[in-house]
């Protein structure tokens, strides 16, 4: 699982299948998800904790049925009980935002399959916008662009490498170039092409535009008093997708609100969950009820 499995994507023999059991924030393969959770529990030392309680961060966009599936997978994997918390709330706690105070806190969490925008005050979510689109969709957009414009097929890992190297949501150093190696769809032979940051921006314009639009939608529904707080405090950007070069500048330009990238965007949600575990009883009001829509 994890990095070891990621290295195998696109390189597996017929007897091995690399799968992603969670897509768009929902379980796509229940049995594999159950095994994945069991592996995680074993890695942290399940033998030392007989049937532990498990806290799982889930996207706010998933349905009640999907919430129950997550809870059931954790219990079957060996947990005594599963508690769910919305990812934007965990991200806000991980970013050390004063979520229990009467001030507006805006968090934008861009994950692999979902983007969630939440405005939080007094320990609750005031405005929430969720979009089933994230970093994987940006990678897919790069793959599609290369296929359509160069007739070259590249894999998921190559598309991600391009995104990390020269991908951006705002103009950057245009002298940067990257060589892309793939399979020519016409001749069927290996082929190398050269791409520029401007081309990659064009390729990912639609998913990046959708992310910016959902941030604007959340701001448009924010109460006036909280809008004033957000204008003073800024928007906090987190998640792996938040590391896309220039995305903070693009959102700031579109919304006229300062944007700050959290110190550890990849770990912010997990750090927030850790704070909930440390003060489990007093913060239990943040848990989601799997039966609640």
Image: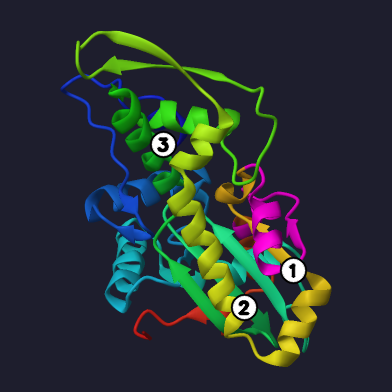
Numbered mark located on residue 257 in the image: 1
Is 71 on the left-hand or right-hand side of 47?
Answer: left
Q: Which residues are magenta?
A: 245-269
Q: CA distance from mark 1 to mark 3?
A: 29 Å
Residue 28: percent from the left, percent from the top? 25, 55
Numbered mark located on residue 219 in the image: 2
Residue 290: percent from the left, percent from the top? 37, 79
Q: Name the residue: 25% across, 8% down.
A: 189
**Which residue occupies the extreme left position in the image?**
14
Residue 85: percent from the left, percent from the top? 51, 72
Q: Name the residue: 56% across, 77% down.
A: 218
Q: For residue 173: magenta?
A: no
Numbered mark located on residue 142 in the image: 3
| Residue 54 can be seen, yes or no | no
Q: Name the residue: 43% across, 31% down.
A: 159
Quadrant of the snapshot with the C terminus: bottom left
Residue 186: percent from the left, percent from the top? 19, 16
């Amino acid at each position: 699982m994890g990095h070891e499995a990621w290295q195998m994507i696109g390189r597996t023999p017929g007897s091995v299948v690399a799968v992603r059991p969670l897509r768009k924030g929902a379980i796509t393969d229940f049995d594999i998800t159950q095994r994945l959770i069991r592996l995680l529990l074993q890695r942290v030392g399940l033998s030392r904790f007989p049937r532990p309680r498990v806290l799982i961060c889930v996207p706010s966009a998933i349905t009640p049925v999907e919430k129950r599936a997550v809870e059931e997978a954790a219990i079957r994997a060996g947990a005594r009980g599963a508690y769910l918390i919305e990812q934007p709330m965990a991200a806000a706690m991980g970013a050390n935002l004063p979520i229990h105070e009467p001030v507006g806190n805006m968090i934008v969490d861009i994950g692999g399959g979902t983007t969630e925008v939440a405005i939080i005050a007094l320990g609750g979510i005031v405005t929430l916008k969720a979009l089933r689109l994230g970093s994987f969709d940006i990678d897919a957009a790069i793959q599609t662009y290369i296929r359509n414009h160069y007739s070259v097929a590249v894999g998921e890992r190559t598309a991600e490498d391009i995104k990390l190297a020269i991908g951006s949501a705002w103009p950057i150093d245009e002298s940067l170039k990257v060589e892309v190696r793939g399979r020519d769809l016409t001749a069927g032979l290996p082929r190398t092409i050269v791409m520029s940051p401007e081309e990659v921006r064009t390729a990912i314009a639609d998913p990046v535009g959708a992310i910016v639009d959902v941030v604007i939608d959340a701001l448009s529904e924010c109460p006036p008093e909280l809008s004033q707080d957000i204008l003073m405090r800024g928007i906090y950007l987190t998640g792996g997708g938040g590391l896309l070069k220039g995305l903070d500048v693009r959102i700031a330009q579109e919304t006229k609100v300062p944007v700050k990238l959290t110190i550890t965007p990849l770990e912010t949600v997990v750090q927030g969950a850790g704070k909930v575990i440390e003060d489990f009883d007093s913060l239990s009001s943040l848990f989601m009820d799997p039966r609640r829509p």
